[in-house]
Structure formats: C-alpha cells, structure tokens
Image (spheres, rainbow, N blue to C red):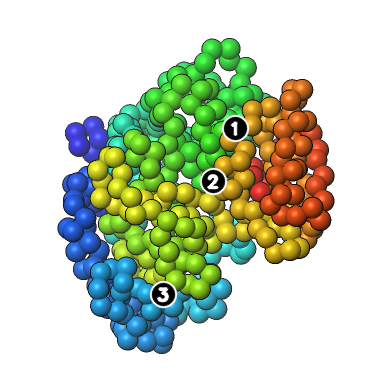
Amino acid sequence: MNLGDRIALGIINIKNLKVINELKKLLKSQDWDRAKLEEYQKNRLQKLLNYAAQYVPYWREVNLASKVKEGNAYSMLINIPILNKPIIREQGEKIWSEKESEYIVATTGGTTGNPLTIRRDYKCDAISKAALWRARYNWGVRPSDRAIYLKAFGGGTLKGKLKMRLANKRVGEAFPSSDEDVRIITRMMHDFKPVAMEGYATGLLESINRSQFKEDFKINVVVSTGEMLYPHQRKELEDRYSARVYTYYGSNEIGSIAFECEYHQLHICEEHVLVETLNEHDQPVINEPGRIVVTDLDNLAMPFIRYELGDVAVISDETCKCRRSTRLISELAGRSQDYLSGSNGTRLQATQLVAYLKDLTKVGQLQFIQTGEDQISIQYDGKSAGAGKEIEMIINHIHKRLGNQVGVITEAVDEIAKTSRGKQPLVLRKI
C-alpha cells in the first residue's frame, strides 16, 4: 500500500483509522492455507462465544457456553440456536453487550419488515470496511484511484461530498428519478473519467440507457452492489461500459460477507464471518441450496451468532482456480421469499428462473409478481417481434414447474416498476 493509498483511506475513514491496519492484515491473510485459516477462525470464535456468554444477557440466558461443541469453528456452532430479527426485536437491549460503551449505530434497510437498530464496535466496523477494500484491490481498484459511488437516497451531506472529493471520489444518486439526475451522473462520468464505478445494477443500467451522450463510456471496473446481479445485467453492464464487472455480498447487520475473485467465484471473507447454509431441518448443507446464517467474528457490541439473514445460497466445497483457501458461495439465490409458488405446494425460486431466462434475448427486462395463490403477473419491456414467442415459452415453463392451475397474466410495459428503494427485483410476492 503506497502513501497515496494510505492518505485516501485515511480521508475516507477519518472517523475510524483502524481500517488502514486491518486492510494490511487482510491483504496478508488472503494467502493463508486452509489449516492456518481454520486455526484463526477457531480462536476468534472461541473468544467471541466466551465474551457473549459472559457479557450479553440474551446469550447468557440461553446458556450459550453449554451448547458449544468440540471441533473446528463450524462444528462448534451446530448446537447454538438460530438468531433472527424477531428474536432481536423481542429481546431489545438484552442482545447488546453490557461491557462495550463505544460503538457505531446503524439500521437495516427494512425491506423485509421494520428496520433493526444495530450496534457495531469500531474494530468490527474497520474489519468490515477493510474487507471491501481488499476486494477492490483484487479487482484492480486502489484507494487513490478515481471512482464514482452511486448511492441510494442521495449523495450524502456537503461535508461528506467534500471528504470524498479530497479522496479523488465522486458521489451521485443511485436511482435517477429525472432526466436532470441522469444528466448530472453522465456528465460526471464524462468529465471525471473514473477508473471504477459502484452502484445498484438497476441504477447503473438506467443511467447509461437514458444518457444523451453518444459515445460509449469506458470504465475499467463496474461493481454491482445492494441487489442481486443477474447474468443478463452483468452482460449488459460489460457491453455498455466496456468494463470488468464484479459483485460483492454484504448486509447492514454484518457488513462485508463475500466478494468475487478474478474468476467470478464468490469468496467468503472467513477472517471476518462464518457462513453456514441450513436445510428445512436446520442442518448444515453443502452443494445444495440452504438458508444463510452468519456468525460475525468481530462484533462484540452486539454479537451476531448464527444470525439468519433471510437469503438462500449454495456453499461449494470446490477449490477456486485463484487458489484462495476460503469457502465459496457458488450460487446466491437472493432473498428466501424470492420465489413463485402454486397451490400444489411447489416453489420456483428466482435463481431457477434466472437459469432458464439467461438465453432469452427478445423479451427484455422482466418482473414476476405473485398476486394470488395461483395467480402470477409477468411484466416485460421487450418490443421486438420475438418477445411474444419468448413470453409463451416462459408461461409454459411456469406451468411445467408449478402446475396448469396457475393463471399467468402478461403485460408489455415501457418500464419495469421499482420498489420504494428504487430496486427492480425479478420476483415480487404480494401475498
């Protein structure tokens, strides 16, 4: 890390300079072999569990210490009860540490219910942010490089924007709501000529599609954040920006969880988190879809131990070509409620839809809306002659998977509707 990178990181993280040292550590630990990584995980987890059992009322009352098994870090977790949002809301202050007095307060997005107020101690915050910067390093983006961040709900305060400018960064609106917003973003791209740009895939595509500039924008790296990145979106981002496209996986509660390597494999940041996938019987599974539960190894202010995020994924036991020793998320299916269903009990997950839709080229952007037990609406913005034929194929696929009793209504629209947070999910459930 050169002097320019350290200065840029210090400016961006002026309230928590620990990020710089934590990044140095993570750039070294990514070369550890599996044995060294597992020993580190076990030691970190043991310290976390001992701390939570002593200083956090909720974990003390569930008798956490008696539930820890012998073995590696993942084995130690098996008997510990699952933590989720309803439990956190019910327990209130009992979920907080009695010992930690300095912490950062944040909230979740609230897309699956009422937002949660969470506490994160400063070391945990530093490690989580450093993990994201390690990902950027691996993508070829240094802290001192020119970059644009498109953020939801505005570009931040005037003071925040000034800080980012000093660090050679620009901030814009993730979801342009007017032609003027688009003009500001595209002019920023045109004049600033960033090395990298980060934002929601939906917003990144909308900005370029509505741009009045005739020439193509050339950006080295485009990073999709905050929502599922589907294959057709990745390809369009690659084509429109002439860029290498990456994504990473995180949450407001935990921070950084996993990032893509140069082979587009999603590596879990196992120095910071332990990620399990559980079946319907709460048993850990590998190489098959399961509900994600995460243990944050660093947050002492509010320990998240076996916390259920509400997402579905597949953890693989394969080794990546990049030779990193961390576990892989081979498939990230999105929210556990992202599925279509029929009255016969069959489900069609969003990830299964994506696999079927990836080769369709005429139908354009799609959104599936479950409006009743056996009622599905499909909206699409494709205008070419072949769109109707592909829609028929999609309807047949839905009937094949969910049964002929499911009624499917289709509608060609000028634009796919967004959620209140500006996203365009593939599947919406309104029942």
Question: Which mark is first along the chain, 3 or 2?
Answer: 3
Q: Residues within 10 Å of mark 1 (few under 14, many from 20)?
A: few
User: Within the image, what quadrant is residue 394 found in?
Assistant: top right
Q: Secondary structure at mark 2?
A: loop
Mark linked to residue 359: 1
Q: Nearer the viewer, residue 276 or 359?
A: 359
Q: Position of residue 380 (x, y in %)?
A: 73, 35
User: Within the image, what quadrant is residue 299 found in?
Assistant: bottom left
Question: Which mark is first along the chain, 1 or 2?
Answer: 2
Q: Position of residue 118 (x, y in %)?
A: 46, 65
Q: Residue at x 61, y 41 (%)?
A: 356
Please give the residue where the numbered disc 2 appears in the rendered image.
Answer: 227
Q: Secondary structure at mark 3?
A: loop
Question: Which mark is first along the chain, 1 or 3?
Answer: 3
Distance between the alpha carbons at the discs numbered 3 and 1? 48 Å
- Residue 31 makes an appearance in the image: yes
- Residue 163 makes an appearance in the image: no
Please give the residue where the numbered disc 3 appears in the rendered image.
Answer: 96
Q: Nearer the viewer, residue 286 or 418?
A: 286
Q: Position of residue 375 (x, y in %)?
A: 80, 54
